[in-house]
Amino acid sequence: MKHALIEHPRQPQYIFPEEERRVFKQEIKDLFARVRQGHLIHRCYLTPDALIYGGKFSRTKANYSAREEMSAIFNATVPISDRAQHSHGIIGVENGPGMESAMRTKSGMFFSGIYGLHTWVGRDVSKDSVGLMSVVMGEVLKGKRIVPDQSDFILDSLPRGLGLGRKVMAEFGLTIGNMEGFPEDGFPYEKKLNGLKHRLNHLDSGDLMTFTFDCNQNGQEVENAYNSEWTTLWARELLHVSKSELDIEGNFDPNAFIFRNEWNGDSHGGFNYVVAQKPMEFAIDGDVYKIHRDEKFGITNSYKMPYEMTKTLANDLGTDLTVYKSKGSRIALPCFIK
């Protein structure tokens, strides 16, 4: 149905190039039309406040993942460093370093423990994250070359001129579980496999790829960890960006949504929704969306890959594999050797 709702004139302040804005608009339309679910993680850290709220969420008492992720990184750093040694040193490549607190803790713990590191490359779609890298990582990794790279780290090539050395690619923050899909579709194994293949395409024979993932299958623990005031504020940032950057007409109200994580054991996933707290009617490009109170829309997914699945992945990727776990065994850190 096409219809133009009346709204007072306003002047959006665009943060996207025009083509990227067109893509973003379609992503938001797909969200409210329920054509796609869990496809917006790359849009959830576009603002400084989103980075702050994400950091606050990671430090809540119920959120076991941040504490145990640090434990897994600590347990893995020395053995990975030993395995990575190369006569030309090490090039560290980090996908999605995120906020300053994550750089100073997770990135700092891991890469400062990699003996022979001469270059660190930080790859992130968030311009705010990229803007922090030179200063923050320059302090954390004193004397090392810091290469900020605003990019889609899954698809875009590595920057040129990184020099010689073995590459160690790391991805923290448990983002490896943020895959698109509906709960009824089951665990998206092929998407996981293809995503790792794309990452490996950036590496050479003998290079290492590692990431952290949540393997916890206790749904109540997952829901308790995610549902908080900070995740609501974090999710609203995406909706505020949508309102300010897109031509949305009507009574679309970002502050009238709350965040809710719902566990689905059959698909090994925690599904992250924004839930309307009042009726709304708005239009994007003339397409009208009528939302009722308590309707939910899936912005991101947090799949919890079973621990045993790493062996299947290594076999399908044709790589060697060693897996390290956190003290509580909820978080795992596999290391794939190309």
Image: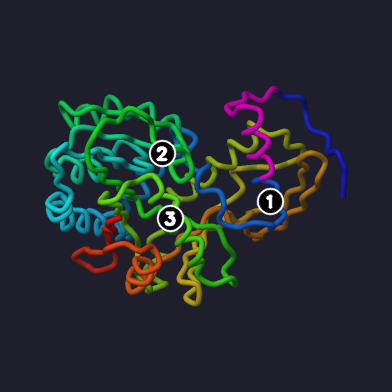
Q: Looking at numbered disc 3 in the image, what kind of residue is underneath it? A: Lys
Neighbour tally class for label 3: few under 14, some 14-19, many 20 plus, Cα within 10 Å: some
Cβ atoms under marks 3 and 1 closer than 8 Å: no
Q: Is residue 27 above or below residue 131?
A: below
Mark 1 belongs to which amino acid?
A: Asp
Q: Position of residue 155 (x, y in %)?
A: 48, 43
| Relative height, residue 204 to residue 296 (above, below) | above
Q: Choose mark 2 or mark 3, whichever is in front.
A: 3
Which color scheme is applied? rainbow
Identity of the residue drawn at 45% across and 46% down: 154
Which is nearer the N-term, disc 3 or disc 1? Answer: 1
Residue drawn at (66%, 28%) of the image? 18
Q: Which residue is mark 1?
A: 30
User: In terms of secondary structure, where does tag 1 sit?
Assistant: helix
Q: Nearer the viewer, residue 105 or 171?
A: 171
Label 1 crowd bin: few (<14), some (14–19), many (20+), radius 10 Å: some
